[in-house]
Image (spheres, rainbow, N blue to C red):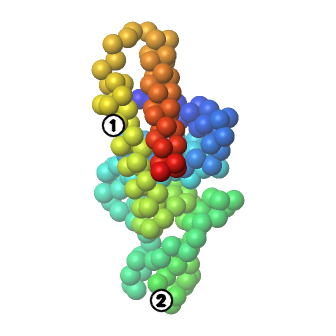
């Protein structure tokens, strides 16, 4: 399982200038340790929930009252919580702060922002597919980590060179 590598990966990305990276990953990374690691670096995780017993019991749902489901009212990173409000404002209290956790993130899963960020993940997955199937990274025919690293580095370099040439041709056309 690659979960212990999340912290070092984010640190390496920050060193390379990707400090405000929003990690959009699949439900396989839905673990409390991942959320703590990512939030500890001041980054908001965008990870869908796995269907655990807590999720099935409805503990990840927004608060509700007799007026219906409460609406998201914003997040406070310093406080580490999200604000939820009664839709009609008639409840006492009219709003409540919910501490950020795996079940209740600072970018709530029910918001359009979360959905749009998560849908951007598809572009990365498409590029991985292109690299694996069109740029010969899936059928690796080399052994040892050093040779695999060299193969991947040369493949990425060729991909970037191809993209640069295409961009130059599009610019001159």
Mark 2 burial class by Cα count in 10 Å: few <14, some 14-19, many 20+: few
Q: How many marks?
A: 2
The tag earlier along the polypeptide, 1 or 2, is: 2
Q: In what quadrant of the picture does the N terminus appear?
A: top left
| x and y, in percent, of residue 80 in the image | 63, 58
Dot 1 corresponds to which residue?
A: 129
Q: Residue at x 39, y 52 (%)?
A: 48
Which one is in front, 76 or 166?
A: 166
| x and y, in percent, of residue 11 in the image | 63, 35
Q: Residue at x 42, y 80 (%)?
A: 65
Q: Is residue 20 above or below residue 56?
A: above
Q: Is residue 168 above or below residue 15?
A: below
**SS of the residue under disc 1:** helix
Q: Give the quarter of the image for residue 111.
A: bottom left
Q: Furthest residue to the front?
A: 173
| x and y, in percent, of residue 52 in the image | 33, 49
Dot 2 corresponds to which residue?
A: 88
| x and y, in percent, of residue 5 in the image | 52, 30
**SS of the residue under disc 2:** loop
Q: Give the quarter of the image for residue 92.
A: bottom right
Of labels 1 and 2, the one closer to you: 1
* Residue 111 appears in the rendering: yes
Q: Residue at x 45, y 77 (%)?
A: 70
* Residue 104 appears in the rendering: no
């Amino acid at each position: 399982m690659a979960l212990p590598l999340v912290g070092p990966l984010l640190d390496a990305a920050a060193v390379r200038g990707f400090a405000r990276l929003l990690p959009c990953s699949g439900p396989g990374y839905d673990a409390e340790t991942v959320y703590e690691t990512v939030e500890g670096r001041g980054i908001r995780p965008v990870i869908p929930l796995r269907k655990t017993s807590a999720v099935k019991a409805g503990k990840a749902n927004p608060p509700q009252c007799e007026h219906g489901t409460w609406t998201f009212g914003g997040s406070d990173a310093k406080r580490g919580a999200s604000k939820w409000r009664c839709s009609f404002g008639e409840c006492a209290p009219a709003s409540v702060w919910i501490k950020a956790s795996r079940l209740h993130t600072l970018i709530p899963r029910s918001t359009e922002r979360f959905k749009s960020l998560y849908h951007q993940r598809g572009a990365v997955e498409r590029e991985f597919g292109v690299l694996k199937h069109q740029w010969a990274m899936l059928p690796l025919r080399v052994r040892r980590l050093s040779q695999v690293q060299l193969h991947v580095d040369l493949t990425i370099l060729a991909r970037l060179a191809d993209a640069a040439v295409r961009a130059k041709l599009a610019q001159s056309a």
